Image (tube, grey):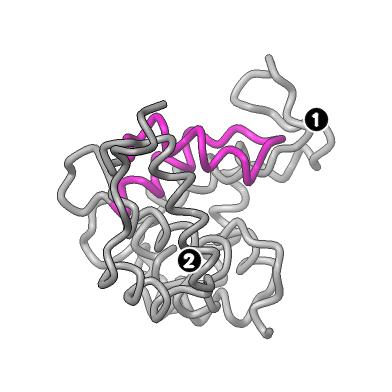
Amino acid sequence: MGCVSSKKKLSKSDLEFLEENTEFTKDQIVEWYEGFILDCPNGELTKKKFIQVYRQFFPNGQAEAFCTHIFRTFDADNSGKIDFKEFLMAINITAKGNPEKKLKWAFKMYDIDSNGSIDRQEMLRIIESIYDLLGATAAQNAPNGAITNRDPNDTPESRTAQIFAVMDEDNNGVITEEEFIRGCMADRVLYQMLTADTSDPER
């Protein structure tokens, strides 16, 4: 994809920043960067390419919708592109981040209109994308991404209702960041579901 001799180098300041702010080692960061520049010689990642890369983490699911939400969260200037630093921060938080950082990031993703709270429609949209992402046995041609081995009563709608019953402490129809973090930290299943993570938040 591009001449090796003309590829950009990772700046010392970006390398130091990523060493301090991610769980990756220096060697891992350099390795990620080399792969990033191979795919994106101009140093910028489009949403289409981001989805292709991220899909590798969830090869059995449908990553497009969830990745679109992730991309939106990190593309702060709505340019339609993210640079390597933004890319690795996204991978770090979603794949390696500590529970509270991951939940703060996840809250931003769920808060689609960035108004500081999550309403039912926003929650439903993300839950639908997570079901698609984690649906290893999703029927390829089933309507609405139906998952064949899942309890038929376990739908994005029922899951959203359940989440609001647990998290919406003051029953005002929206979930604040504090309610979101408290609810996830108190319920391992919710944590894993809402962060698309299979690790234990206690660790």
Above or below 177: residue 64:
above
Classify mark 2: residues with Cα within 10 Å, few (<14), some (14-19) or many (20+).
many
Image x and y of residue 117, in percent: 30, 65
What range is drawn magenta here?
45-74
Between the C-alphas of marks 2 and 1, the distance is: 30 Å
Whether residue 176 is visible: no
Indicate the amino acid at tag 2. Ile
Classify mark 1: residues with Cα within 10 Å, few (<14), some (14-19) or many (20+).
some
Image x and y of residue 98, in percent: 54, 78
Q: Which label sits on residue 3?
A: none
Q: Which label sits on residue 148?
A: 1
Number of numbered discs: 2
**Is 109 included in the stretch rendered in magenta?**
no
Q: Nearer the viewer, mark 2 or mark 1?
A: 2
Secondary structure that dominates the magenta span = helix
In the picture, which quadrant includes the C terminus?
bottom right
Residue reaching furthest to the front: 5
Indicate the amino acid at tag 1. Thr
